[in-house]
Amino acid sequence: MTRARLWLLLPFGALALVVLLVPLPFAPAPVTRELTVVARQFAFEPPVLRVNRGDRVRLTLEASDVVHGLHVDEYGVDARVEPGIARRVEFVADRAGKFRYRCSVSCGPLHPFMTGELVVSPNLPFVRAVGLTLVVLAATLVSLRRLPPGGAPGTT
Ligand SMILES: [Cu+2]
């Protein structure tokens, strides 16, 4: 690799360091999330659960009136809960995205509308990995580009 090419790659090296080292204002390492969801006709409380990717989610499920269920397709979670008897459900939120959860026990006329949302945000290492990949990709493209005769401006 010529000196000129090395100079061209220098900004990318600096950018890679920035991506790796700059503190981002969100999402630290995976943790265990203790969440309580109360099911009643015909809603879940809270209706939206937010966790970070990689978090271990420990759900305590309660029913306040009749028998309900909680079902999350993508995570293979399915629990049935009776009034007065809390259920514990545990899973690792290993996929980022928004996932609908729903009541899986027919509990009344509006049962089909009894849903909630599980929001799994990408965590910090994931964001850094994506950023780093983009920087490496850009650096690769630049280093493969043919330099004009005589090298980069200002280096001859
Ligand atoms: Cu229900």
Image (spheres, helix red, strand yellow):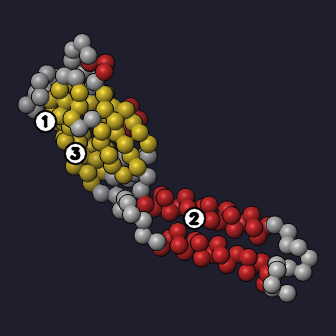
Three-letter residue code for mark 1? Ala
Q: Is residue 76 left or right of residue 8?
A: left
Direction left: furthest residue: 84
Q: Which residue is mark 2?
A: 132
Q: Earlier in the sequence, mark 2 or mark 3?
A: 3
Q: Label 3: how many residues lie within 10 Å, few (<14), some (14-19) or many (20+)? A: some
Q: Which residue is mark 1?
A: 86
- Disc 3 under 8 Å from ligand 1? The reply is no
Q: Are marks 1 and 2 in contact (CB under 8 Å)?
A: no
Residue 85, horizontal then vertical, whole percent: 10, 32
Quarter location, residue 74: top left
Three-letter residue code for mark 3? Leu
Residue 65, horizontal then vertical, whole percent: 11, 24
SS type, badge 3:
strand
SS type, badge 1:
loop
Residue 145, horizontal then vertical, whole percent: 81, 66
The residue at 32%/46% (across/down) is 50
Q: Nearer the viewer, mark 1 or mark 3?
A: 3
Q: Label 2: how many residues lie within 10 Å, few (<14), some (14-19) or many (20+)? A: some
Direction right: furthest residue: 149
Three-letter residue code for mark 2? Leu
The residue at 35%/62% (across/down) is 28
Q: Which residue is mark 3?
A: 35
Quarter location, residue 154: bottom right
